[in-house]
Amino acid sequence: MHLLLCNDDGYKAKGIQILAKYLNSLGHKITVVAPNGERSAQSHAMTFYQPVKITEISSNEYAVDGTPADCVALGLSKLLKENPPDFVISGINHGLNVGIDVNYSGTVGAATEAALMGYKAIAVSADIEGLKGEQQEGLFLQAAKIVGQVLENAKTLDWPRLEVLNINVPQKAAQICIAECGGESLYVPHIEELSVQSKKNIGVYLIGGLSRYEPHDMSQDVSLISTGNVTLSFVRTKQSSTVSNQKLGKIVGSLKI
C-alpha cells in the first residue's frame, strides 16, 4: 500500500521515523509530509490566507511550515495528487490522545482532515511519559506493529466514512480493547499562575495537566489506557448530531423570524 504519514511533533520526531521505517519494512510505500517543528495541540487548525512553505527533505519526505492539518491538505491535494495514498496515518504521537483530549490533538486533527477529504485515516499515539532511549523506541515500535496489523486486516473491515480510527498504546500493554472515546479526561486540569498581577498586567498563566485521574469507567479509552490496555476507537469527524437535531422539533415551531 501507499501510505501518507503525518504528525504534530515534526518530521524529525522519533515516533514518525520509527513508524515510517517499520511500515516500509513491510513493503509499504511511504510518503512523509509533516510539520517542520513541534505543532502539538493544534487540533484541526489550518493556515488560511497566509503562505505555507513546503521543503523537500529527501525523497518522499517533506517538511511543512504549517499545522498538521495543513500537511494533510497539501499532501493530498498537491504533492500526491497524481499518486494518492491508500491510507493516511498520523503519528506516532509522543503522548496519548484519549477522551476529551482528542479535541485538542493535532495528531487527530490531521487524520480528521484526511477523512474529510475522503481518505481512510488512522491516528496513533503512545504513552511515552517518563520513558527515554531504548524504552521509548521500543514502545513506538510496538505501536507501529499494531498499525501494521490493522492495515493487514483493513480489507476485511467495512471502514466507516467520515470517521478516524484512533489507536492509543500504553506502557506495558496487557491486551487490545475496543473503547468509547467519550467525555472523560486523562489529566486533572490545572492552571498555574506564573507572574503576579499588576494594574495593567492581568497575569501570565500556564495551562496544562500533570496528575492523572483514577480510572472509573471501563468502557472509556481513558480508563482502559490507565489500566494497561491498547485502545481502538472510531471517532466521528461529522459535527452535526442527527438525534439531537430531532429534539429541536419540539421548539422550532414556536420560533419566529
Image (cartoon, rainbow, N blue to C red):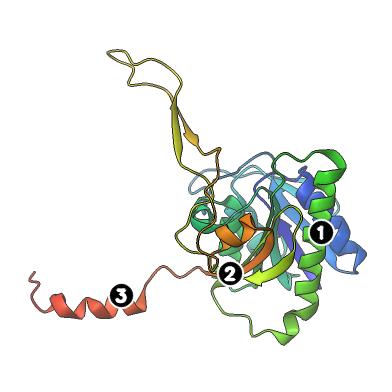
Are there few (<14), some (14-19), or many (20+) residues within 10 Å of tag 1? Answer: some
Q: Residue at x 74, y 84 (%)?
A: 155
Label 3 secondary element: helix
Q: Residue at x 77, y 80 (%)?
A: 153
Percent of width and height locating residue 34:
70, 50
Depth order, front residue of 22/188:
188
In this rendering, which labeled residue sits more in front, label 2 or label 3?
2
Label 1 secondary element: helix
- Is residue 193 depicted above or below 8 in this figure? above
Percent of width and height locating residue 250:
16, 79
In the picture, the quarter occupied by the N terminus is: bottom right
Residue receiving disc 1 = 142
Percent of width and height locating residue 183:
44, 60
Please report contact status of discs 1 and 2: CB closer than 8 Å, yes or no. no
Disc nearer the start of the sequence (2/3)? 2
Disc nearer the start of the sequence (3/1)? 1
Please report contact status of discs 2 and 3: CB closer than 8 Å, yes or no. no
Left of 23 or right of it: where is 234? left
Disc nearer the start of the sequence (1/2)? 1
Q: Amino acid at mark 3?
A: Ser
Percent of width and height locating residue 181:
52, 65
Residue receiving disc 3 = 244
Mark number, residue 20 = none
Residue receiving disc 2 = 179
Marks 2 and 3, how far apart at CA: 23 Å
